[in-house]
Amino acid sequence: MNYRHSYHAGNFADVVKHALQLICLDYLQQKEKPFFVLDTHAGIGMYDLQGEQAQKTGEWEQGIGRLLQAENRPACLETYCSLVRSLNPGDNLRWYPGSPWLSQQFLRDHDQLGLCELHPDDAEELADNFAGDKRVKVYREENGYIALKALLPPPQKRGLVLIDPPFETTTEFNDIVTGLKHALKRWNTGSYVIWYPIKDPMVTGGFQQMIRELDPPKAYAVDLLIRHAEDATKLNGCGMLFINPPFGLLEPLEELMPFLTELLAQGEGASWQGRWVVAES
Ligand SMILES: C[S@@+](CC[C@H](N)C(=O)[O-])C[C@H]1O[C@@H](n2cnc3c(N)ncnc32)[C@H](O)[C@@H]1O
């Protein structure tokens, strides 16, 4: 396991992922009933953009750096931006939150958050970052795919599962599909959100086909390319696949995605696309 998210925190892919994560969390919070969030690949929860690893790549400058400086942001990005700003009083941008911290901000007393992290060092840091919050349980060195069997369905019967693997191995897309197969057998009314990289769009199409074959109740995919996907060795974009997307998701996308596409472009050919992979029958 070589992947460390601290090299990439706050990059364009995090901006897409976290902006969409917050729309889902906002929807969950609109109802009084308790909810559960499972983050199968949690990372450490908080990143130092001035630390050695983030400084080495500088990726955040083309992600959250651009977003915070942008004018005329769509209203649905304001919570995200103000949460990041709340960690960084003044003009300096040093701290960038991971998906666990963002989920934590939406929890009420009766909601729960489960966090799995397999890397021993990251798991320890994650546990330290969330120590003392009884609503949050850190599953140290726990395989997120196993948690899809072990922790579902949640007693609340309402919630969100975020799957955000590092894609270090060639089996990751298959692992996701196998994990989802088990999860959907246990809980097919839950909302699942899966982040994936786009290098070669053919691979993305293959993944979406595998999802179709799982036959979930509904699935919607949003893909964003930051440039033409001509060189498949590069991260040319990313996508989010939503199984049982929250009702409120599609409407803000019409304003959000064109804005993010222009903001995060890194060359000719930036574009976005949203489509039903499995439409409601
Ligand atoms: C892309 S990062 C997660 C970033 C985080 N979701 C965020 O948005 O802030 C992926 C993380 O998954 C961890 N990881 C890799 N394989 C795992 C597995 N099978 N189960 C749980 N965690 C895993 C890696 O150590 C890494 O910290």
Image (cartoon, rainbow, N blue to C red):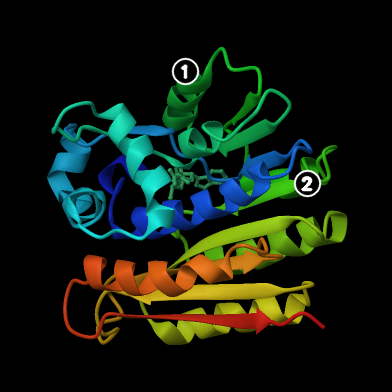
Q: Position of residue 252 (x, y in %)?
A: 49, 66
Quarter of the image for the C terminus: give it: bottom right
- Asked which secondary structure carries label 2, the reply is loop
Q: Count the numbered circles shown.
A: 2
Q: Is residue 93 above or below residue 15?
A: above
- Asked which secondary structure carries label 1, the reply is helix
User: As rendered, which of 240 and 233 lies closer to the eye?
Assistant: 240
Who's the residue at 65% across and 28% down the image?
Answer: 108
User: Residue lying furthest top in this view?
Assistant: 132
Q: Nearer the viewer, mark 2 or mark 1?
A: 2
Who's the residue at 48% across and 57% down the image?
Answer: 20
Who's the residue at 67% across and 73% down the image?
Answer: 219
Q: Position of residue 215 (x, y in %)?
A: 78, 77
Report whether 193 appears left or right of 79.
Answer: right
Mark 2–mark 1 Cα distance, whole angstroms, equals 27 Å
Report whether 70 appears left or right of 253.
Answer: left
Who's the residue at 56% across and 61% down the image?
Answer: 194
In the picture of the structure, the residue carrying the numbered disc 1 is 128
Q: Position of residue 49 (x, y in %)?
A: 21, 37
Amino acid on which disc 2 is placed: Arg
In the picture of the structure, the residue carrying the numbered disc 2 is 158
| Label number found at residue 143 | none
